[in-house]
Amino acid sequence: MPEAIRTHKPRLKLPQQHGTLKSRQGERTLALNGATWRRLRAVVLRRDPLCPRCRQAGDIEFAIEVDHIDSDPSNNTLSNLVGLCKMHHGQKTRQAERERSPGTERARTVPSSTRAPPHL
């Protein structure tokens, strides 16, 4: 009697990639396209429907993005998440990247008297 015919491909076990569950400090613990993050994002945006920075400036703008207050994507507690408008979330993200980039730290630590004058 013939062996049973396989009707499906065997599953391959792939290693976890970046953007999926991680536990180290500073790396995402929730995938941005995962159901858990979508539910958490919905809770935050329901709680904070308007951008607090815009409200502070006297404007009204809907919060459409969720920001980690301490800039640590592994800290997903509700107290660390706030809804922001696209403009303010982008500003905060760019500022955090400038503060983390090694080029800006080196420029801050080099005294201006030791820098070479610009070429004309």
Image (cartoon, helix red, strand yellow):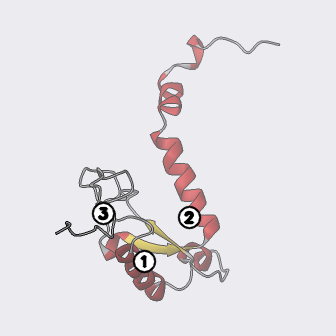
Q: Residue at x 41, y 64 (%)?
A: 69
Give residue 54's position: percent from left, percent from top. Answer: 62, 75
Give residue 36's position: percent from left, percent from top. Answer: 34, 76
Specify the label residue 89 is tagged with.
2
Q: Please, which residue is most extreme toward the left here?
A: 1
Specify the label residue 75 is tagged with.
3
Q: Residue at x 35, y 69 (%)?
A: 80
The residue type indicated by label 1 comes to: Arg
Q: Quadrant of the N terminus?
A: bottom left
In the rendered image, which residue does mark 1 sit on? 38
Secondary structure of residue under mark 2 = helix
Instruction: Give whichever of 29, 6 is nearer the camera.
Output: 6
Instruction: Give whichever of 108, 1 is nearer the camera.
Output: 1
Q: Earlier in the sequence, mark 1 or mark 3?
A: 1
The residue type indicated by label 2 comes to: His
Q: Quadrant of the C terminus?
A: top right
**Residue mark closest to the camera, 1 vs 3:** 1
Crowd rating for badge 2 (residues with CA inside 10 Å; few <14, some 14–19, many 20+): many
Compared with 103, 53 (above or below) is: below
Q: CA distance from mark 1 to mark 2?
A: 17 Å
Q: Residue at x 77, y 12 (%)?
A: 119
The quarter holding residue 11 reads: bottom left
Specify the label residue 80 is tagged with.
none
